[in-house]
Amino acid sequence: MCGRFNATFDGGVRKLYTSLKINKMVDRPINKHFVKATDTVAIVREKANSRVVENAIWWLLLDSTENGFKPSKYTSFNTRYDKLNTPNSAGYQAYRHSRCVIAVKGFGETEFINKKPVHYFDMQAEHGGLLLGGLSRDWINNRTGEVKTSCSVITLPAHKKLQHIHSKAMPLILPQDENIIDHWLDSTLTDVELFVPLLQPHIPQNLIAQQIDKPMSHKPINKAELITLDT
């Protein structure tokens, strides 16, 4: 996943929020087509046995400044699946105690060859929206006392159906199954062996893949492609 997603808050995404049984909306969901890494995003997580919607910086590692926070120099908008069980890694504790979901319309992919972009694609749910599996952390600024929340999206190996779009990785798209989501958001559930099956490349719902000119303008190129769900 290449550092951008579509957070348009349309009817399909609104239904996703309803299905998540939110107890408290600390912040309103973001309604924006182009969200990039280090932007503010809306996450859903469990705090004090309640499911809350709150804003987070899409960059898991933050550094304190005199007036607040800034993204760390270490890239952390994504957390690789194979780092989740590495002690002292950025996402190790969050994976066990502070998992979250990010409800989106879709996400963006950019393929690079020799560090140069060769194409851009917008991916979105054929119907409704997508629940991306993520991690969150809270940071306290010792100078100001400010508390800031950050987040990342877990990435998996590339899926064979998406190799022609992005050959290296894909985001964790959680199945919209109530039991799975309940377990994922349960902050008391620390036995992550339960989540091993989720860390395999999987497409739980149909996706529409649209090649675009550039992420900012997102003008369609060629005909959109249907990527069918895994059965």
Image (spheres, rainbow, N blue to C red):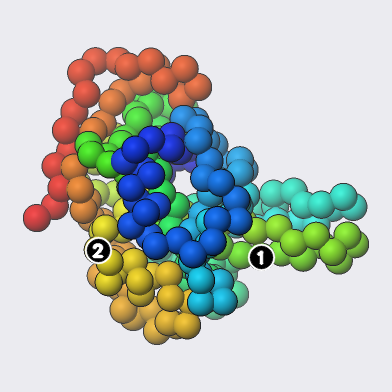
Crowding at mark 1 (Cα within 10 Å: few <14, some 14-19, many 20+): some
Residue 136: quarter of image = bottom right
Name the residue that disc number 2 marks.
177
Name the residue that disc number 1 marks.
138
**x 35%, y 74%: residue:** 183
Which circle's residue, 2 or 1, is located before the other in the chain? 1
- Of residue 166 and residue 39, the one placed in the foreground of this image is 39
Residue 80: quarter of image = bottom left
Report whether residue 156 is seen. Answer: no
Report whether residue 178 is seen. Answer: yes
- On screen, residue 70 versus residue 108, left or right, reads right
- Of residue 201 and residue 13, the one placed in the foreground of this image is 13
- Residue type at mark 2 is Asp
- Of residue 125 and residue 231, the one placed in the foreground of this image is 125
Percent position of residue 165, x then y: 29, 34
* Placement of 4 over or under 196, stated as above or below: above
- Residue type at mark 1 is Asp
